[in-house]
Image (cartoon, rainbow, N blue to C red):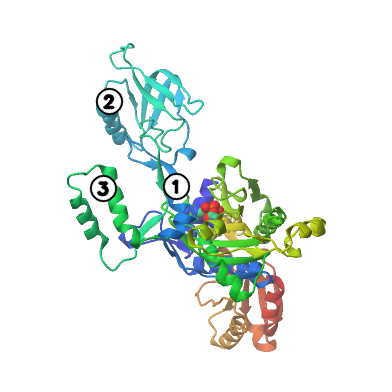
Amino acid sequence: MAQKFRALLDLCKRRGFLYQSAEIYGGLRGAYDYGPLGVELKKNIQQSWWRHHVYYRDDVVGLDTSIITPHPVLKASGHVDEFSDLLVDCMLTKERFRPDKAPELHITDSKVLVQAPDKSTAKLWQQHITEQLAPGIKTILDGKKIWLPLISFTSPSHGQPGSIVFAMNNNDTTSPLSLPYHGYVEPDSLSPFLTPSRPFNLMFKTFLDPIDPVERIIQTTQQHNNDNSQQTVREAVDQVLRPSTVYLRPETAQGVFINFEQVTRTMKLKPPFGIAQVGKSFRNEIRLEHGIFRTPEFEQMELEYFVSPWTASHWFNYWRKLRYDWWLTHACHPEDFRQRDHEKDEMAHYATGCTDVEFKYPWGWGEIEGVAHRGDYDLTQHMKNTGANFEVTTTAEDLPQEEEEEALDKNKNKKYVPHVIESSCGLNRAMLAYLCDAFHQVPDPDNDKLPPRNIMKLHPQLAPIKCAVMPLTGKPEFLPIVQKVAQSIRQRGWNTMVESQKLKIGKRYYRHDEIGTPWCVTVDYQSLEDDTVTIRDRDSGEQRRLPWKDVSRYMEQHLY
Ligand code: GAP
């Protein structure tokens, strides 16, 4: 499995789906650039999402709001105070990690294992442990492994830490060295030498100010020469910076909520209705993992659907089903997509219910989307903090059908703040999921001793190139028909490539199978006589002959 995933990553790099960002400068960790094929795939996923949720419906409109978000918006939404993960530093390896995802202590034969990347690092770490982190404890160096013999060990319980009591070098059991144990160790090295956990806000803070804020920070700290406790200086600096503090938005949703009044007024909308937005979001993630799965800069496709409190659970179920079905529309392996309800303690600060859609990535199940019942939390928060009024008047549509008459009587002309059902998915994660789902390796049909052949069985709607048009040979007479076919497909708005590689036809087909092109059209000698061409299907390898003028109609039948 790992080998297949490596082959996929290699393909993405080699064929222009994904590049390491700033690669010629050594690369930037967690940052990726999307190559010519990657950008098409991402755009096609986004367009399918937009078509299904905006164009195919009467009740959803689009929006595109600012990435730069002022402090008060994210203070009101709860992100300034609550959008944080716990962060722990490893004093041995200097790695930072999230404790909720970290493994437990590794004990074998009453010894704790610490695993270094190589022998020389293991030696340095052993010295650091015995001289600084746990002076005097017994250590056993075994290649890249450092073993720390134990006297005793207890697990944390009822919120209280457990303890790890180490054996000492001088075998003194009267004053052994003990570390608190919170139930986790550093994920890569398994080191138990950790700082206490502390909350870490995930938002990227910056300053919208023509004057460099560093000057003001220096002045403020100088003014506190006599009272320079860290907290006092910090508060003073925060106060000075507050007016120009902005954040790169951590979700696109807040832009939708703060435009609620403008959109309903200008588009004459009443619940139930939705606002869709696709755009970049930013989070200063502690742990960047699995390529584009978790990155600081990513794209979200979010739909905020506004409903009455009485119909909210109906719409929550409706969107959970509809969104899951959308994922399956493009999937080769539907069994690798599942829904999972959140436990109460997993939910974000605003949510009262949440169901994730997960994909079975090569490393295990991972979240690709959250469908959340956000209640009236966001609109109420922005009302409280601005004086805006987002209330709407109850109508028959707002009430569940079975209780309509009775409930309408009770609530007639009552005002309510709409509740929100949100569907939020990661575009980059969607791309990675569909690449993993579509990537197939088959034995080479000509020689089974050769490495397997790659076929990217992307849904035709998602394929970066919809059709490759190619002449059978370099004969110039083929070119006018090649151009005419390509033009007829391009007129439909589908990305088409005229394949000019001087390779054997079979090799050209293979190059397109590998990047997911669903159809290859070949112009040959017969085309010159009767205006027909062959069209080859990527997945079956079958070829059929048809008039070149029918190619785009044939594609349309198979695309939608
Ligand atoms: N507005 C709700 C919200 O943002 P979330 O569960 O925090 O909810 C929604 O994020 C989706 O955004 C996730 O399911 C995931 O697909 C994507 N996502 C979140 N953080 C990400 C990151 N650091 N890198 C890539 N995608 C991310």
Q: CA distance from mark 1 to mark 2?
A: 34 Å
Query: Which numbered marker is on residue 84?
Result: 1
Q: CA distance from mark 2 to mark 3?
A: 37 Å
Which residue is depicted at the point 31% across and 54% down? 239
Q: Is residue 355 left or right of residue 32?
A: right
Q: Does residue 245 sit above or below 225 in this rendering?
A: below
Which quarter of the rendering shows the C terminus? bottom right
Judge whether residue 380 can be spotted in this image: yes
Q: Residue 345 location in percent, x, y? A: 56, 40
Q: Secondary structure at mark 3?
A: helix
| 383, 126: nearer the viewer | 383
Q: CA distance from mark 3 to mark 1?
A: 23 Å
Which residue is depicted at the point 59% across and 81% down? 490
Q: Quadrant of residue 378?
A: bottom right
Kind of residue sitting beneath label 2:
Thr
**Which one is closest to the eye, mark 2 or mark 3?**
3
- First in sequence: mark 1 vs mark 2: 1
- First in sequence: mark 2 vs mark 3: 2
Kind of residue sitting beneath label 3:
Val
Which residue is depicted at the point 40% across and 37% down? 197
Query: Which numbered marker is on residue 130?
Result: 2
